[in-house]
Amino acid sequence: MQSQMHYKRQEINVNILEKYLTDRFTIKQVKKIHIWLRTGIQLFFFLLFPSAYTAAFAGIKYIFTQIGAGEMVSVSSFVTVLIVLCGYTIIFGRFFCGFACAFGTLGDAVHAGYVWCCKKLKKKPVALSQMISTRLSVCKYLILLMIVLMCYAGIYSKAQGTSPWDVFSMLTARKLPNASYKIGIILLVLILIGMCTQERFFCQFLCPMGAVFAMMPILPSALFNRNREKCPSKCGLCKKRCPAHLEIDGDTALSGECICCHACQVTCQRKNIQIGPKIKNKTNEKKN
């Protein structure tokens, strides 16, 4: 419950600060402040709550292992973390993914470092096309299904040492994985390479918890919306800046893919994006 309160306070503070900043500073200034603000929050959760992701995922594995074995599912600490994060996602959106997930923070750091190196070397960064990204986003659902079926069948324990997030969890706990985690280490290295080519590579394409959060019904008050009538023709800055290349249209079939990073909001030149109910055109209302 303490971590839930931390997430709630951080989400409210971010929304208030975003509104304050966009009203008083230029877009360029807001972008810089947003980068530092988000980095600070990510470091806070990375250092203090690095195991939240693996704990929630352990809850998924435990539930289906118990169901497959025909045993009762108790509300363990892992299940409690899972329930808290899923409930939080429904109410506030995927703020955990955008600001608090340690694996997501790692992905942001790796991608930013790669882009910085390319800039210094005056080389164009390798990047995946939007079409490939859209198709690969299905993979995380297949990975989730495979893990759920393995847990249900009681054979997931035989795959011990192959999980890259187990290796990452050990590293954040300052423990070096032994030789039995060889496959997991190789997969983690490959994921790190993928993180260079695509912002939030793991979150978009491979994260089983990301698949769970994407399927959560998010309340309208936590969705990003915009007034299309105020958007310049052929702009699309918000979609280009979005790590998942999403259309900012509130509740859509892909709205669950939004990780609430606020990148679209701080990029919009006309301050036309907000969190909450659909923006109404006040000009049209006065005419009517």
Image (cartoon, grey):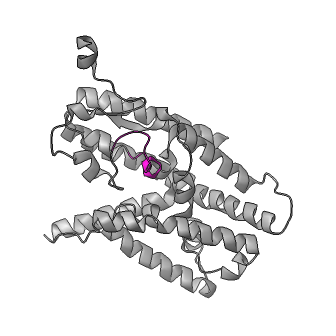
Left or right placement of residue 78 versus residue 5 in this view: right
Q: Nearer the viewer, residue 73 or 52?
A: 73
Left or right placement of residue 128 versus residue 76 in this view: left
Q: Residue at x 46, y 61 (%)?
A: 203
Q: Residue at x 57, y 74 (%)?
A: 167
Q: Main secondary structure of the magenta part?
A: loop
Residue 79 shows up from this direction: yes
Q: Position of residue 48 (x, y in %)?
A: 56, 52
Q: Is 257 colored magenta in this rendering?
A: yes
249 over 208 or under it: above or below: above
Q: Residue furthest left?
A: 122
Q: Residue furthest right?
A: 71
Q: Is 255 colored magenta in this rendering?
A: yes
Q: Residue at x 29, y 31 (%)?
A: 21
Q: Residue at x 38, y 49 (%)?
A: 39
Image quadrant where residue 231 sits: top left
177 over 233 or under it: above or below: below
Left or right placement of residue 69 versus residue 213 in this view: right
**Magenta-colored span:** 248-261
Image quadrant where residue 33 sits: top left
Q: In which quadrant will I find the C terminus?
A: top left
Residue 206 shows up from this direction: no
Q: Position of residue 210 (x, y in %)?
A: 52, 58
